[in-house]
Amino acid sequence: MAEMPLEIRRTRTAPNNYTVLVSTDGKNVGNFYLTLVDSNNQPSKRTFVKKPYWYGFEKDIPIYIDVEKYLGDIVQVNIDKDDTPWYCLKIEVKTPSGKSLEFPCYSWLDKKEVKIREGSAKVAEDWNTDYLFGYQFLNGCNPVMIKKCVNLPETFPVTHEMVEGSLKRGLTLQEEIEEGNIYIADYKILDGLEANRTSQNTQYYLTAPICLLYNNKHNQIVPIAIQLSQKPGERSPIFLPNDNEYDWMLAKMWVKSSDLNVHQMVTHLLKTHLISEVFEVAMYRQLSSVHPVYKLLSPHVRYTIAINAQARANLISKDGVFSKISSVSADGIDELMKRAMETLTYKSMCFPEDIKTRGMENTPKYYYRDDGMKIWGAINCFVDEVIKIYYDNNEMVKKDLEIQEFVKDVSKFGMKDSKGKKFPQSLETREELIEYLTVVIFTASAQHAAVNFGQYEWYGWIPNSPSTMRTRHPQEKGTVDLKRIMDTLPDRACSRELLGTVWDLTQFEDNESCQHAPPVVSVWFSVLGCLAPALFAPLVAFAPTHALSDDVLALTHGLAFLLYSPLWRVLWELLLLGRSCPE
């Protein structure tokens, strides 16, 4: 393809002119080529961008690209450059129709070829699309509910005839399942829980839906069938994309409402906050303050007891915020926690094992997995380096009574696993100790950040994830209209309370911000900052063996980019400072 000559001007008009603004930190930028790619994977001509004479006084580079044929919305920007790394904050593109698109980056570009995906937050615009609904199962606030569907549950009698119109490969539903293209999110854990009532005795409603999802030919995860209870029958129809517009809209709202309640009480509160408290209490009880593992863990779990005490008093008590704005009653929350604890195991807290158990190893566009695996690897590498300083062999681990009592305390008293069936009560090798400590740090930092800091972005638009529902779920098709949807959604007071709560939960302390951090917070920021201050010093000893993949470095993650990138930038800059991390 022929290359287009340099076109950098202050003003320019053309029928098919795209205006591009590349924002940098004003340092080290050399010549590069820029290409726009639309949703049909059609590229513009490569535009050569030469470092302008005025560069150094301004940090933004304007570029004007003419195309012979209108490309439509741009979904990706490709940059081809030389070996010199430079820092890109973001790229803004204005289409000929006047639409503005943003491609956040906030990353060092050290590869020759970089691809940056569009990342404008459009929840309020696109919340009702099947694509964004499905996308949130992968990279939203609760990216741990979805799993590969191997067999349809008996309680969910979906047939091929029902979903045939949604399957685009010419295969039957069973064949799509066998090909690995069908996913499921089942909220059985909510079945039969006591629904909530407001202080004014207004009844809220709760259900336990099942949602079937499909990986289509565009590698998009989209819903193809929803049942709003665990009991199939005439009063529990299976809603489909080709049903009445409002039937399908409300069915998806019910799924998202259930997802929010499970996310807040199980994924967020129980599996990060309360579990981290168990590790912190056991650490204080069994490890002396001079023990190297105490020194290793304390920056990651400190303050957890204090913040959880506040949560118990102000969020999940009978008069707490979540008891007012959640569809689950205070007693129902207790029962929900008990049910979740029954399936919680040590292995399920090991990030790679959880991904494998849910069959999500090869799911496309699952950036929670992609970035999480790299962060898990970096933490594991760091812990490996520290532990091998103090433990020369496995025998030293076995003979460390403080470590053995720490692990036993977690299992017997924290997890109430007296027989050690779900959580280990002893550690035999250095590798076991390294993995165990990786679980503790990852849970308290990266995992918490992944399920906490995106809340305001996703929950800030109430119809996308209503915390309560004020009417019963529909029990037959063709009965839903816009009025019923408005009557079902949370009222103004409840919505205001939810907005204030999730906004507050996603704020940072002063020591948690990083240079060039974008206005949208990072999902992977930890509570204590980017992987906690104590992690910084050991990390500077590592070179980029665990550096970012091309996709992560280029941050080609669409909406997910807004939530994931800053931690990677900080981690990358730290990794650049030192020597190789052992494989």
Image (cartoon, rainbow, N blue to C red):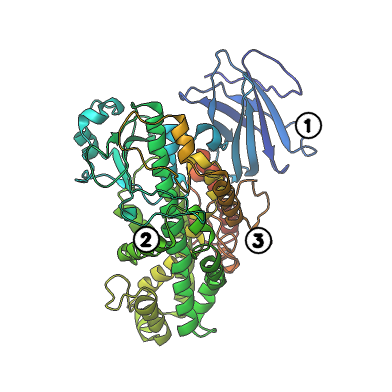
Is residue 142 left or right of 516 when viewed as pictured? Answer: left
Q: Distance between the residues labelled 3 and 1?
A: 40 Å
Question: If you read the primary sequence from the N terminus, does the residue marked by circle 2 or circle 3 appear first?
Answer: 2
Q: Residues within 10 Å of mark 2 (few under 14, many from 20)?
A: many
- Residue 188 seen from this side: yes
Q: Mark 2 falls on what kind of element?
A: helix
The x and y percentages for residue 225 are: 30, 36
Q: What amino acid type should be assigned to the residue bearing mark 2?
A: Leu
Which residue is drawn at the image coordinates 64% and 46% (left, top)?
518
Residue that label 3 marks: 509
Which residue is drawn at the image coordinates 61% and 34% (left, top)?
102
Which residue is drawn at the image coordinates 64% and 32% (left, top)?
92
The x and y percentages for residue 241 are: 35, 29
Proximity of marks 2 and 3: CB atoms separated by less than 8 Å = no
Residue 272, compared with residue 198, is above or below; it is below
Residue that label 1 marks: 53
Which residue is drawn at the image coordinates 43% and 70% (left, top)?
437
Proximity of marks 3 and 1: CB atoms separated by less than 8 Å = no
Q: Mark 1 falls on what kind of element?
A: loop
Residue that label 2 marks: 336
Q: Mark 3 falls on what kind of element?
A: loop
Question: If you read the primary sequence from the N terminus, does the residue marked by circle 3 or circle 1 appear first?
Answer: 1
Q: Which one is in front, 164 or 438?
A: 164
Nearer mark to the viewer, of 2 and 1:
2
Q: What amino acid type should be assigned to the residue bearing mark 1?
A: Tyr
Q: Which one is in front, 376 or 562?
A: 562
Q: Exactly how many numbered labels are in the figure?
A: 3
Residue 325, compared with residue 8, is above or below; it is below
Q: What amino acid type should be assigned to the residue bearing mark 3?
A: Glu
Residue 240, compared with residue 316, is above or below; it is above
Q: Which one is in front, 413 or 72?
A: 413
The x and y percentages for residue 406 are: 41, 80
